[in-house]
Image: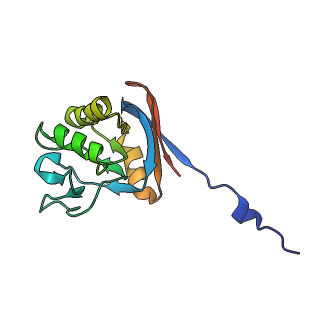
Amino acid sequence: MNRPDPLSAAPRATREFAARTLAAGSAGGTPLVVEPLSFWGGYDAGQGRIVEPAHPQHGQSLAGKVMLMPRAKGSSSSSSVLAEAIRNGTGPAAIVLVEADLIVAIGVIVAQELYGANVPLVTVDAAAFAALCAAGSPLHVDAGGDGAQATVRVV
């Protein structure tokens, strides 16, 4: 008689981290930790690849990933490149930052308003960010209305 292994049947414990909503939405995916990136000149919205030659993640795609980036860098034009990447389906599924960034927020909000594409954008504290970067498992971001509490779950 085959008996189920009680340990394999046990549900995995999820870890949940508090976050602050910058743009509402709900999405998940494989995490990609990204050093600060300027989308303007640093990301090809058509191909969906980081193209900044000296960037540590050069050549990698953000498409469908949960982008973990401590802060953004660069031009105010980054918002238009990010919005186009989201419209093209070559942008991240969700974005988690430590430092709120107006340019990234504008890109996400423009994609939401013009194209109906919701990409949750949240901030977390440095300790939560480090834990999420080290998790190595898919993440899910649930972000309510402006400034509302949000959560990032390791799934």
Single out the residue that lies furthest toward the right: 1
Q: Residue 89, image x and y in percent?
A: 31, 49
Vertical comparison of 130 with 143: above or below: below
Which residue is found at the position 33% from the left and 48% from the top?
92
Residue 69 placement (x, y as % from top left): 29, 48
Name the residue rendered at 19%, 35% in the picture. Answer: 103
- Horizontally, residue 22 falls left or right of residue 28, namely left
**Left or right of 98 in this view: 80:** left
Rendered location of residue 102, percent (x, y): 22, 31
Q: Percent from the top left, x then y, of residue 117?
A: 35, 37
Residue at figure coordinates x 44%, y 60% from the top left: 136
For residue 79, what is the image quadrant? top left
- Say above or below: 123 vs 47: above
Q: Nearer the viewer, residue 129 or 47?
A: 47
Res. 75 image quadrant: top left
Q: Is residue 12 visible?
A: yes
Total number of numbered discs in the rendering = 0
Q: How is the image coloured?
A: rainbow
Q: Is residue 123 visible?
A: no
Quarter of the image with the N terminus in it:
bottom right
